[in-house]
Amino acid sequence: MIITSKRRQRSTGIRSRIRPPSLSDNYATLDQVMHHVVLSVPDYDYYVCLPPTSPLRTRHHVQQAMKQILDDRADSLISVTNEYRSIWKKEGEEIRPLVERRKNRQETEPVYVANGAIFICKREVLKKRKKNSGTNEFVCNET
């Protein structure tokens, strides 16, 4: 099913629903849209969001993510990329590391950065928490 802000002119053979205008502007969050979907289409145990802004995501990535969330019995999954570089944040007039790194990059454990390619969440989590991350998250770094 496609949830969109615009009516599709051509027939794709895929069911689609129109989002309300309040969830179609630049201020609507993915959490709000997914919560709306779970309330308006309550037929599924898991909800998968595949944003169109991730053109390098493949069918294999989606299949692997679904396998991981089911195998691990997680209540949500987000796709991430490994990050080995130091990440800094400005605090006042100084910048400070978000993750302190005292070793060479090849010797450190990665931190994870959401890449926005795949979001999967159980219906109960979306209904209760109104966001697409649960308490038993799993990260997928295949994409």
Image: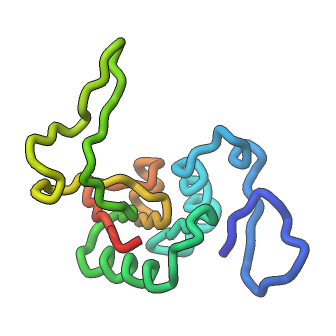
Q: Residue at x 85, y 65 (%)?
A: 7
Q: Which part of the image, by quadrant, shows the C terminus?
A: bottom left
Q: Nearer the viewer, residue 112 or 44?
A: 112
Q: How many marks?
A: 0
Q: Which part of the image, by quadrant, shows the N terminus?
A: bottom right
Q: Where is residue 93 shown, x and y percent of the image?
A: 35, 12
Q: Residue at x 33, y 69 (%)?
A: 140
Q: Nearer the viewer, residue 127 or 98?
A: 98
Q: Nearer the viewer, residue 130 or 66?
A: 66
- The colour mode here is rainbow
Q: Residue at x 36, y 65 (%)?
A: 77
Q: Residue at x 73, y 82 (%)?
A: 14
Q: Where is residue 124 shown, x and y percent of the image?
A: 41, 61
Name, please, the residue furthest toward the right.
9
Q: Residue 54 vs residue 9: left or right?
A: left
Q: Residue 135 vs residue 33: left or right?
A: left
Q: Nearer the viewer, residue 84 or 63?
A: 84
Tell me if residue 77 comes above or below residue 56 in the rendering. Answer: above
Tell me if residue 47 comes above or below residue 59 in the rendering. Answer: above
Q: Where is residue 126 shown, x and y percent of the image?
A: 46, 56
Tell me if residue 22 comes above or below residue 72 in the rendering. Answer: above
Tell me if residue 114 comes above or below residue 56 in the rendering. Answer: above
Which quarter of the picture shows residue 34? Answer: bottom right
Q: Where is residue 18 shown, x and y percent of the image?
A: 77, 61
